[in-house]
Image (cartoon, helix red, strand yellow):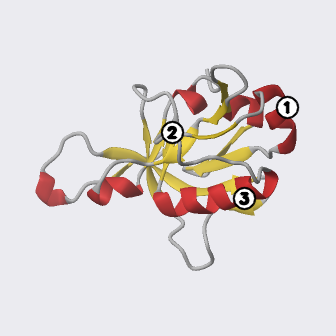
Amino acid sequence: MQTKAYRPDWTNSVKQWALDGQTMLYGTEECQKVGQEKTYAAIIDTGSSQIGIPDSMFWELKLKWKRDFNDLDCVTDDNFCQVMTPCSETAKKLKPISFQISGQVFELSPEQYLHQAEGKRCQFAISGNQLKGSSGNLMLMGDTLLRHLY
């Protein structure tokens, strides 16, 4: 896959390679509004357990999840959206999520992006990217995606 620089040249950073994150789908629906940016730098982050996506994408994804779960809670935990239903039941109501990165499509089933927490709490392991500035528009691909690729 071809890589690209994602930091401005003036930073003189040697750690600036990224893949070309092109789009994200929930089922067959794009998670970007019409006219909204559709390419983002995608960073493979082996030190992260989840997937972080730009806030604009995350906002759209949350709207789609809320259609499937009106009791979706994205406030109680700063890092994850969650429902108070076991993941085995939650997964049946959700759609797969696909990421197009450098021309390749990577799909995760709901079982692959859900995390069973304590009790009946089921957490969604995709969140808004918490980085600030220009790094806030990165797609951070952590273990949630990586463990299904190798």
| Amino acid, disc 2 | Asp
User: How far across and down, in percent of the image, does residue 59 sit?
Assistant: 57, 61
Q: Nearer the viewer, residue 37 or 14?
A: 37
Circle 1: element type = helix
| Amino acid, disc 1 | Glu
Neighbour class for label 1 at 10 Å: few (<14), some, many (≥20)?
few
Per the image, the residue denoted by label 2 is 77
Per the image, the residue denoted by label 1 is 89
Identify the residue shown where x is 77% and y is 33%. Answer: 85
Q: Is residue 142 left or right of residue 144?
A: left
Eye-nearest disc, 1 or 2:
2
Q: Quadrant of residue 136?
A: bottom left
| Amino acid, disc 3 | Lys
Circle 2: element type = loop
User: How far across and down, in percent of the image, does residue 56 sit?
Assistant: 51, 64
Per the image, the residue denoted by label 3 is 64
Q: Is residue 24 left or right of residue 64?
A: left
Identify the residue shown where x is 43% and y is 26%. Answer: 46
Q: Quadrant of residue 90?
A: top right
